């Protein structure tokens, strides 16, 4: 990798000091709800829901209570933590109007739903949308973050409050887990007669590691020829120089600079999709690394051939699971399949450390499925208000457009059928062209 490129990335990272990020003053308006008593929450101990509007300062104001909520277990994913959401708002959408929905019981935070408020055109329909603060270009996840033991009560209380909240035609939350609480909210809305919809947004591959006596047993599902090829390529790489796996748990500026430079040196840099191609995204990932390191779940892996990294992972190790939001490899070493060699080495390390799972994140790409025996579904959820704009948006996206596609397909099949009847030879040529 060119030293000049590494040096540029190192200097760029050093210019980003998350501790010196611009201070954002808290601008907020608050709407309180009457405490709601549900079957799971007796009237003597009700849940109170607030809706606040402001900026990233709202997130930072309740961050300690939010982290405690995540640590209870049901929503322990790093993507649900306040530092992750705050970094996105601070570096990717610093001008966003934040809407923060929170549920409280006895002064304790029991649920939180961060959203961004905007006016947009939804499939041509102008409406007011509240959406999750996630990056569609990254494998982020969203949900209604809740604690242990009162999920049903908090969902019911939040839905009761949202029905009375003005200012929205659509609540749009992408990549909700299959067992996510926001899907409960969607079902409650549908039961109340609100237009709702959801679609499968991605299938994320993962490798379970818990409960197996050896790693070979955990990987027994993989193709034997594929595993033999991985071992053969590692032996070939070891002929060049000694190969080892390096793991780093701190956001070292030099290591991050190497990762950003490696990613930018390949096809992602040529297509303009590498992190380093966008200063705000590089600042965002540098801040994420700093925060994840601060709270003990950052992991940067490097497969070293001699003193040179040939593949790297920008990873997270949290709650017994290793996941990889971003990865890169040096394309000069592509004949050795360094990406697969790194995955193999990390799987060995994760199993040795007693981790329960390797989560690839993102979509089920073929190379990931070489390793993964299963996928986990995530859903894009749409909750529409019964306003003219909300009903129009739901009708256009989930009724008119699908009907138009079905009609188009039938007309296309009809034209092909007519062509087959009138001119069989031309039809055969069209099918096999």
Image: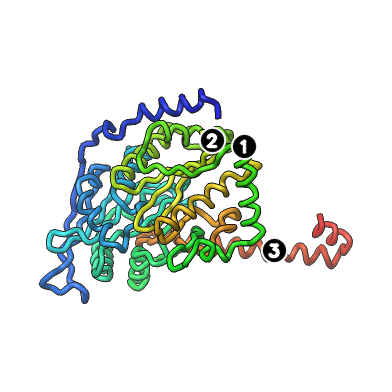
Distance from the alpha carbon under mark 2 to that under mark 1: 8 Å
**Picture mark count:** 3
Report the disc number at residue 137: none
Residue 391 sits above or below residue 330 on the image: below
Residue in front for this viewpoint, 235 or 186: 235
The mark found on residue 240 in the picture is 1
**8, 396: nearer the viewer:** 8
Residue at (35%, 40%) from the top-left corner? Answer: 250
Q: Is residue 85 visible?
A: no
Image quarter where the N terminus lies is: top right
Give left or right: position of 232 versus 69: right
Residue 301 in the image: above or below residue 406: above
Q: Quadrant of residue 219?
A: bottom right
Give me the residue at 49% from left, 54% from top.
Answer: 347
Tag 3 secondary structure: helix
Q: Secondary structure at mark 2?
A: loop
Q: Are marks 3 and 1 in contact (CB under 8 Å)?
A: no
Upstream in the sequence, badge 2 or badge 1? 1
Mark 3: few, some, or many residues within 10 Å (few <14, many ≥20)? few
Question: What is the x, y in percent for residue 252?
Answer: 37, 35
Residue placed at 40% from the left, 42% from the top? 248
Does 204 sit above or below residue 332?
A: below
Q: According to the image, label 3 marks what residue?
A: 411
Q: Nearer the viewer, mark 3 or mark 2?
A: 2
Quarter residue 11 falls in: top left
Mark 3 to mark 2: distance in Å?
61 Å
* Residue underneath mark 2: 306
Measured from the top left, where is residue 401 in percent x and y? Answer: 55, 60
Left or right: residue 26 versus residue 428 is left
Residue 386 location (% of width, % of height): 35, 63
Report the residue that reaches farthest toward the bottom: 39
| Residue occupying the point 25% across, 55% down | 101
């Amino acid at each position: 990798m060119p030293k000049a490129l590494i040096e540029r990335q190192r200097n760029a990272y050093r210019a980003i000091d998350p501790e010196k990020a611009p201070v954002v003053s808290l601008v907020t308006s608050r709407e309180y709800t009457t405490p709601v008593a549900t079957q799971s929450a007796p009237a003597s101990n009700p849940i109170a829901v607030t809706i606040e509007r402001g900026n990233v300062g709202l997130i930072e104001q309740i961050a300690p209570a939010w982290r405690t909520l995540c640590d209870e277990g049901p929503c322990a994913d790093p993507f649900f933590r306040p530092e992750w959401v705050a970094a996105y708002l601070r570096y990717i959408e610093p001008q966003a109007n934040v809407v923060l929905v929170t549920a409280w019981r006895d002064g304790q935070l029991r649920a939180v739903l961060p959203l961004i408020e905007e006016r947009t055109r939804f499939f041509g329909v102008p409406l007011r949308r509240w959406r999750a603060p996630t990056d569609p270009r990254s494998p982020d996840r969203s949900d209604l973050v809740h604690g242990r033991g009162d999920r049903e009560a908090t969902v019911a209380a939040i839905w009761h409050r949202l029905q009375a909240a003005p200012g929205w035609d659509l609540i749009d939350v992408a990549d909700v887990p299959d067992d996510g609480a926001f899907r409960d909210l969607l079902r409650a809305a549908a039961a109340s007669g609100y237009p709702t919809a959801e679609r499968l947004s991605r299938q994320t591959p993962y490798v379970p590691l818990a409960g197996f006596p050896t790693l070979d047993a955990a990987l027994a599902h993989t193709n034997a020829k594929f595993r033999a090829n991985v071992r053969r390529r590692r032996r070939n790489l070891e002929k060049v120089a000694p190969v080892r796996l390096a793991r780093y748990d701190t956001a070292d500026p030099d290591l991050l600079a190497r990762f950003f430079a490696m990613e930018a040196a390949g096809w992602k840099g040529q297509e303009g999709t590498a992190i380093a191609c966008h200063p705000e995204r590089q600042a965002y990932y540098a801040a994420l690394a700093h925060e994840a390191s601060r709270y003990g779940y950052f992991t940067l892996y490097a497969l070293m051939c001699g003193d040179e990294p040939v593949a790297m992972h920008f990873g997270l190790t949290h709650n017994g699971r290793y996941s990889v939001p971003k990865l890169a490899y040096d394309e000069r070493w592509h004949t050795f399949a360094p990406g697969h060699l790194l995955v193999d080495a990390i799987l060995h390390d994760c199993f040795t450390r007693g981790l329960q799972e390797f989560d690839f994140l993102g979509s089920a790409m073929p190379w990931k499925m070489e390793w993964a025996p299963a996928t986990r579904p995530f859903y894009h959820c749409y909750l529409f208000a019964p306003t003219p704009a909300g009903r129009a948006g739901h009708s256009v996206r989930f009724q008119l457009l699908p009907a138009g596609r079905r009609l188009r397909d039938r007309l296309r099949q009809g034209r092909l059928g007519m062509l087959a009847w009138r001119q069989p030879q031309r039809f055969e040529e069209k099918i096999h062209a």
